[in-house]
Image (cartoon, rainbow, N blue to C red):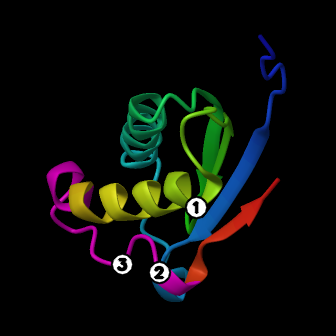
């Protein structure tokens, strides 16, 4: 029986809306941990998640069960939905028009 032996690494990057600089050193680790949990839930295991005050990078191994589009869609949707739980002053993360996908 044939099987797929490929590994697809994806690099997703997106900025805060209007590049608003609110990802300070206190909130960044919480955002990164939250995004890692989203990736794990989609079986797209995070390799490195980082960023700066106005943007985030996610490098993960794409699951064979999830399309690239679904991964990006879920990261965006769940990070938008979870932003208020992480910090009440997060209002502009991410800007839906600012998400970029690299493979």
Indicate which disc, 2 or 1, sits on the residue closer to the N terminus. 1
Asked if the residue at tag 1 contacts the one at tag 2, i.e. Cβ–Cβ closer than 8 Å, the answer is no
Q: Is residue 19 left or right of residue 31?
A: right
Q: Secondary structure at mark 2?
A: helix
Residue 19 numbered mark, or none: none
Residue at (31, 65) in percent of width and height: 80
Judged from this view, the residue extending furthest toward the front is 1
Residue pointed to by mark 2: 96
Q: Secondary structure at mark 1?
A: helix
Residue pointed to by mark 3: 92
Residue at (37, 49) in percent of width and height: 27
Q: Horizontal and vertical percent for residue 22?
A: 42, 68
Of residue 51 and residue 57, the one placed in the foreground of this image is 57
Q: Is residue 10 left or right of residue 17?
A: right
Q: Is residue 7 left or right of residue 51?
A: right
Q: What stretch of residues is rendered in magenta?
A: 83-97
Mark pair 3, 2: CA separation: 10 Å
Of residue 66 and residue 47, the one placed in the foreground of this image is 66
Q: Horizontal and vertical percent for residue 85?
A: 15, 52
Of residue 94 and residue 101, the one placed in the foreground of this image is 101
Q: Secondary structure at mark 3?
A: loop
Select label 1 or label 3 by which is in front: 1
Bin the neighbour count of mark 3 within 10 Å (Cα to Cα): few under 14, some 14-19, many 20 and up.
Answer: some
Bin the neighbour count of mark 1 within 10 Å (Cα to Cα): few under 14, some 14-19, many 20 and up.
Answer: few
Asked if the residue at tag 3 contacts the one at tag 1, i.e. Cβ–Cβ closer than 8 Å, the answer is no
Residue pointed to by mark 1: 69
Select label 2 or label 1 by which is in front: 1
Mark pair 1, 3: CA separation: 22 Å
């Amino acid at each position: 029986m044939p099987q797929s032996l490929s590994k697809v690494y994806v690099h997703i990057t997106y900025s805060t809306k209007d590049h608003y600089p609110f990802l300070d050193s206190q909130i960044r680790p919480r955002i990164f941990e939250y995004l890692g949990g989203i990736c794990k839930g989609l079986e797209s295991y995070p390799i490195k998640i980082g960023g700066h005050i106005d943007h985030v990078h996610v490098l993960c191994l794409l699951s064979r069960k999830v399309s690239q589009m679904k991964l990006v869609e879920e990261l965006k949707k769940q990070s938008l939905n979870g932003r208020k739980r992480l910090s009440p002053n997060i209002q502009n993360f991410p800007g839906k028009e600012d998400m970029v996908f690299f493979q």
